[in-house]
Image: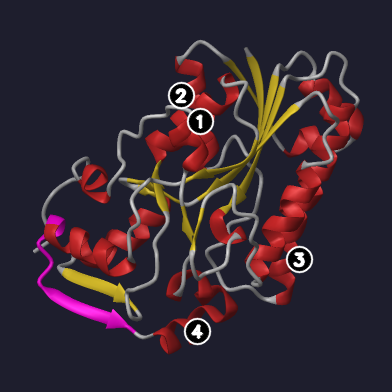
């Protein structure tokens, strides 16, 4: 199948492209040039049986007013253009998978996709607007909104930053450590996205997180064991608020999201628990 991917050169997009190509699909990257006009976007989408929307500026930095606008425009603006082009396609793609995040949910409680509860943070509002824009795709095209947890890969993305002190022998816990850390292995993520593309029964919001309910403290203990980190440090919430401002809320609190739809559909996680992810890593701390 010919599958168009916005954000194809990003962290997730690169892995997804490689996975789909390995399965014999043709991945069509939608770069900036494709979004210069509706005509250029229509030309890039021509003949695609599926579209995956991964575009969006990185969320893991301080949210100034200017950067909030960039986060909004890179998600809502891009999705709006993409949906407008998809709605004019003939023949239309069978499925549209559009990214979102588990930041949609409140920080307290645990939620599956059947629990229609939204949080009150900037991130929750951003996800709601992002998902609303994707929902404007015409009826008849299967829409799947993929709510990602933190995506972990051994030497890339968030984990490369998180693991740095552990590799130096320092185990870092954030604030109380009681907050949920909703995560998913990059291999499981691309397999899950492929599963969604091929499964006609999966639609609407879909949580892409490992089944394990992991706290930050439990993650820190697992990483400390793996890297033999002996010095344990707790970073206070106030220090993170000074450094990251409003964005620190992603670190000192976190939603619990259960991948109910994937589990009910029979998807099998290769890394359902953090121990399985850690088993893929290089071993000891640096001396």
Position of residue 176 relative to residue 180, above or below, is below
Dot 4 surroundings within 10 Å: few (below 14), some, or many (20 or more)?
some
Q: Quadrant of residue 191?
A: top left
Residue stretch in magenta: 226-235
In what element is the residue under mark 3? helix
Magenta-drawn stretch contains 233 = yes
Q: Which mark is residue 19?
A: 2
- Confirm whether residue 250 shows in the render: yes
Q: Which residue is disc 4 drawn over?
A: 241
Q: Alpha-carbon distance for marks 2 and 1?
A: 5 Å
Sequence-wise, which precedes: disc 2 or disc 3? Answer: 2
Q: Which mark is residue 187?
A: none
Identify the residue at horizontal 57%, vertical 67% (top origin): 106
Sequence-wise, which precedes: disc 4 or disc 3? Answer: 3
In what element is the residue under mark 4? helix
Evaluate if marks 2 and 1 touch, with contact meaning CB atoms under 8 Å apart.
Answer: yes
Residue 284 is left or right of residue 99, and the answer is left
Residue 169 image point, x, y percent: 15, 68
Sequence-wise, which precedes: disc 4 or disc 2? Answer: 2
Magenta-drawn stretch contains 180 = no
Q: Alpha-carbon distance for marks 2 and 3?
A: 32 Å
Position of residue 133 relative to residue 231, above or below, is above
Sequence-wise, which precedes: disc 3 or disc 1? Answer: 1
Q: Which residue is disc 1 drawn over?
A: 16
Q: Alpha-carbon distance for marks 4 and 2?
A: 38 Å
Position of residue 137 relative to residue 149, above or below, is above
Identify the residue at horizontal 8%, vertical 64% (top origin): 287
Identify the residue at horizontal 43%, vertical 35% (top origin): 263
């Amino acid at each position: 199948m010919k599958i168009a991917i916005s954000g194809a050169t990003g962290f997730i997009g690169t892995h997804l492209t490689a996975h789909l190509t390995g399965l014999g699909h043709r991945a069509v990257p939608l770069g900036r040039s494709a979004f210069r006009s509706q005509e250029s976007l229509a030309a890039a989408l021509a003949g695609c049986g599926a579209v995956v929307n991964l575009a969006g500026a990185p969320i893991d930095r301080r949210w100034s007013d200017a950067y909030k606008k960039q986060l909004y425009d890179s998600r809502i603006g891009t999705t709006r253009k993409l949906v407008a082009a998809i709605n004019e396609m003939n023949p239309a793609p069978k499925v549209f998978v559009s990214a979102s995040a588990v930041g949609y949910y409140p920080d307290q409680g645990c939620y599956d996709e059947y629990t229609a509860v939204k949080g009150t943070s900037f991130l929750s509002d951003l996800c709601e607007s992002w998902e609303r824009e994707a929902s404007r795709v015409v009826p008849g095209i299967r829409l799947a909104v993929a709510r990602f947890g933190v995506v972990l890969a051994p030497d890339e993305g968030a984990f490369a930053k998180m693991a740095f002190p552990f590799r130096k022998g320092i185990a870092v816990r954030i604030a109380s450590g009681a907050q949920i850390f909703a995560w998913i292995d990059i291999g499981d993520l691309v397999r899950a996205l492929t599963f969604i593309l091929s499964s006609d029964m999966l639609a609407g919001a879909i949580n892409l997180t490992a089944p394990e309910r992991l706290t930050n403290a439990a993650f820190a203990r697992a990483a400390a064991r793996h890297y033999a980190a002996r010095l344990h440090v707790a970073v206070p919430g106030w220090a993170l608020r000074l450094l990251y401002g409003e964005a620190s809320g992603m670190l000192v609190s976190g939603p619990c999201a259960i991948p109910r739809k994937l589990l009910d559909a029979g998807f099998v996680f290769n890394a359902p628990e953090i121990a399985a992810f850690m088993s893929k890593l290089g071993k000891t701390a640096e001396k």
